[in-house]
Image (spheres, rainbow, N blue to C red):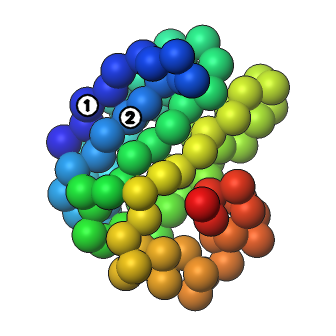
Amino acid sequence: MLLWEDQQDGRHLFLDGELDHEACDTISASFRDVIGQAKGTVIVNLSKVPFVSSKGIWLLLESRSKLKREGRQLLVRGLSPHVRKTFETVGVFKAAPEWDA
């Protein structure tokens, strides 16, 4: 599930459930649309996401790259210990050190 709201510090996206291959297929178009319509920083909250697959990581990093090219920023917050470990294992924090907060 994907919900979003605009707040003072940017557009917040709230994901709920596993971000696996099937979920990415379901939400990727909406995810990209919501990010594309944001005016500034996008903050993705993963506090209710227990698992992120390689496709989920790719969706996040691809979106980050697009926003970065536009002079904007995508931040990821609320990582569970399992998701944090996955990100560490595959080297996400080397590509996106600002996500390790």
Q: Is residue 38 left or right of residue 17?
A: right
Q: Which mark is residue 82?
A: none
Q: Check disc 2: other Cα within 10 Å, few if <14, some if 14-19, many if 20+.
A: many
Vertical placement of residue 51 versus 96, above or below? below
Which residue matches tag 2? 13
Q: Quadrant of residue 41?
A: top right
Q: Is residue 55 visible?
A: no
Q: Quadrant of residue 3?
A: top left
First of labels 1, 2 by sequence position: 1
Q: Amino acid at mark 2?
A: Leu
Vertical placement of residue 74 versus 36, above or below? below
Which residue appears at 49% of the width and 83% of the height?
85
Answer yes or no: do the residues labelled 1 and 2 have beta carbons within 8 Å? yes
Residue 33, horizontal then vertical, whole percent:
43, 22
Q: Which mark is residue 3?
A: 1
Q: Amino acid at mark 1?
A: Leu
Q: Secondary structure at mark 1?
A: strand
Q: Which quadrant: the N terminus?
A: top left
CA–CA distance in space, label 1 to label 2? 6 Å
Which residue appears at 68% of the width and 69% of the height?
93
